Amino acid sequence: MPQVSGGPEGLNSILEKTYQACMKQQGGNEEKCSRIAWTAAENEGWHKNKEGEWIKS
């Protein structure tokens, strides 16, 4: 499951929820669900700033 160690709770929450929902629908395709979870986080505005910290814009 995609997670950011020490990352913002909001980011890890969307990654977890999206990944878990995808795994139920896709029957265990971990690679595909990881990509979908990261895309959902990006669509929610999460990205790394110049200092390498995760922020939501």
Image: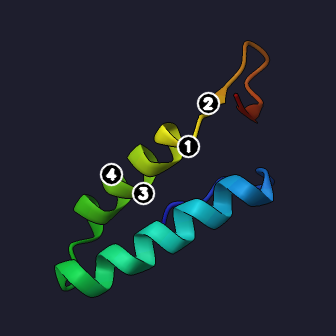
Query: How far apart are the two marked residues, 4 and 2, measured between alpha carbons?
Result: 15 Å
- Marks 3 & 1, CB-CB < 8 Å contact: no
42 up-or-down from 14: above or below: above
Q: Name the amino acid, label 2.
A: His
**Residue 53, position as x, y percentages in the image:** 77, 30
Relative horizontal placement of residue 40, taking residue 3 as reference (left or right): left
Pointer 1: what residue? 44
The residue drawn where x is 76% and y is 50% is: 7
The answer for how far apart the CA atoms under marks 2 and 1 are is: 9 Å
> Of the residues tagged 3 and 1, which is closer to the observer?
1
Q: Which of marks 1 and 4 is nearer the N terminus?
A: 4
Residue extending farthest top = 50
Mark 3 to mark 4: distance in Å?
5 Å
- In the rendered structure, the answer to whether residue 10 lies left or right of residue 33 reads right
Residue 2, percent from left and from top: 50, 61
Residue at image location 18% in from the left, 85% down from the top: 27
The residue that mark 3 highlights is: 37
Q: Mark 4 points at which residue?
A: 35
Name the disc covering residue 47, or none: 2
Of the residues shown, which amino acid type is indicated by label 3?
Ala
Left or right of 54 on screen, residue 26: left
Residue 49 horizontal/vertical position (percent): 72, 19
SS label for mark 1: loop
